[in-house]
Amino acid sequence: MKNDLILKVKNLNVVLDGDEIIKDLAFEVKERETLIILGPNGAGKSTLLRTLLGLVPFSGEVIWNTKSISYLPPQELFQRKGLSPLSIEEFFKFKNVSHQKILDIILAVGLDSSLLKRRFGAVSTGQFQRMLIAWALVDEPRVLLFDEPTSGIDVGGQETIYSLLHKFWLERNLTILLVTHDLNIVWEHGDNVLCMNKKTLCYGKPRDVITPEGLEEIYGTGIKFYKHQHI
Amino acid sequence: MEFVLTLIMGASLGGAAGYLGTLMLSQRMALVAGPLGHLTLPGIALALILGFDVSLGAFPFVILGIIFIWLFEMRTGLPMEAVTAVVFAGGVAITFLFLPEEKVVPALIGDISQITFLATIIVVILSLTIFFMTKKIYSKMILAGISEDLAKVQGANFRKYNLIYLLGIALTVALGVRIMGGLMTAALVAIPASTARNMSKSLNQYSYGGLILGSLACIFGIFGFRFTGLPAGPLIVMVGTFFFLVSLGLKR
């Protein structure tokens, strides 16, 4: 594997309960790259991230050039109600990091340190998502796998989440694999885009591969879009 | 001397059971110790008839019961609570077919008379083992309750953890029947954990609260036995229930 590659995926196939979820997927991710994964619901995007982490049985090759990987599932998949008493700080301590590191990252995502004393399930959706970003980054991973980071968050909050991710990408030389439905993010932050619906539909730089025809193939319907011009 | 040994035994087992109980309550499994306690009854009956240690009789029966529950669930696809009911009812029925009438009360509600030094040492060592085994898996099991994927990415090996967890429960039940009998073992894990949950704001307060409350309930219950002559098992349950009622007023 080339030195600047952090992930190489080849002939990736996933079959769950007899259903083919991912078929013959291949792509590469370079260090500091942001790869956006696009596709309709049920396309296998979330399964792809879970497969890359070894949480799902697969055939083919998934070769990581690092073990420093952090992952955030969609917010809806977090159990927040009916839990044992758990403070936010204790949630961070699951990662065996110092109090100072926790405090630094909490402040870096724009939250107040008093949040650390609050119960895990007793914060707003926006605060919860920022807190999760802080959790994902507190042990300084090289790679962040992020599944629909703005689901359930209002438009203002979505902007904040992506600005935060961009800030950390700049500051920490992060490599990011991001599942999203938001085409604006593809234009603003994506180095490469992988469009999939079980198999690869397009793969490359957004300006080369995202076309109205391509989007129709991905989502099965005409989608209006405005191509961003970067000067 | 025997009273001090009983106190040491009760305090250590009550603490370990209370600590494990907080994890079981988090997994919504606090009541599992009840049917498992009933499953020990044939083993207790055998021990009482043949005159050996009740915990030694209880342990293989809990393990056997867990294996049966696991096998029946796999074969039938029935909910775990249904197969547990089948297995523990069978265990209770077998017990009462063979247990002599005079042995029924100690089998059901425990007997802390004639505690030996060796038995105390063994219970203390096994209680410490239960505590450290539970502590090892505690944070990952709690994290799994929030997101199983996150726990796995953090390196949780659930096959191993579930084995440790079940072994911890089996040991607690087998040791608990000596003090509580086959009928009330669930109280050792469920009541201190529920009380601690009412009073805690953090996981530390909750888990160690369960440990302290479990220990205190056993200590006060055994003192009660010393001064009233009433059986220790029901007294421990009453002390635990009293703590629980007090905690309702302190609920956070």
Image (cartoon, coloured by chain):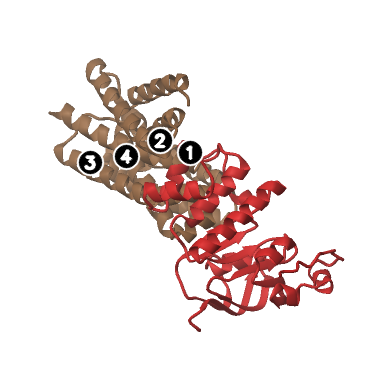
The residue marked by circle 2 belongs to what chain? B
Give the alpha-carbon distance from disc 4 to disc 1, as whole Å: 18 Å
Q: Which chain is red?
A: A
Q: Residue at x 48, y 47 (%)?
A: A106
The residue marked by circle 4 belongs to what chain? B
**Callout 3 environment at 10 Å: few (<14), some (14 to 19), or many (20+)?**
some
A146 relative to A192, above or below: above
**Callout 1 environment at 10 Å: few (<14), some (14 to 19), or many (20+)?**
many
Residue B36 x %, y %: 42, 42
Q: Circle 3 sits on which residue?
A: B124
User: Mark 4 against mark 1, which lies toward the viewer?
Assistant: 1
Q: Quadrant of residue A61?
A: bottom right
Q: Which chain is brown?
A: B
Q: Secondary structure at mark 1?
A: loop
Q: Quadrant of residue A30?
A: bottom right
Examine the rendering and report whether any part of residue A44 can be seen: no
Give the alpha-carbon distance from disc 3 to disc 2, as whole Å: 22 Å
A133 relative to A36, above or below: above
Q: Circle 1 sits on which residue?
A: A84
User: Mark 3 against mark 1, which lies toward the viewer?
Assistant: 1
Q: Amino acid at mark 1?
A: Ser
Are the residues flagged by discs 3 and 2 from a single subunit? yes
Of A6 and B4, the residue lying toward us: A6
Give the alpha-carbon distance from disc 1 to disc 2, as whole Å: 8 Å
Question: Which label number is shown at residue A169?
Answer: none
Give the alpha-carbon distance from disc 4 to disc 2, as whole Å: 14 Å
Q: Amino acid at mark 2?
A: Tyr
Q: Circle 4 sits on which residue?
A: B16
Q: Secondary structure at mark 3?
A: helix
First in sequence, mark 3 or 2: give its number: 3
The residue marked by circle 1 belongs to what chain? A
Q: Amino acid at mark 3?
A: Val
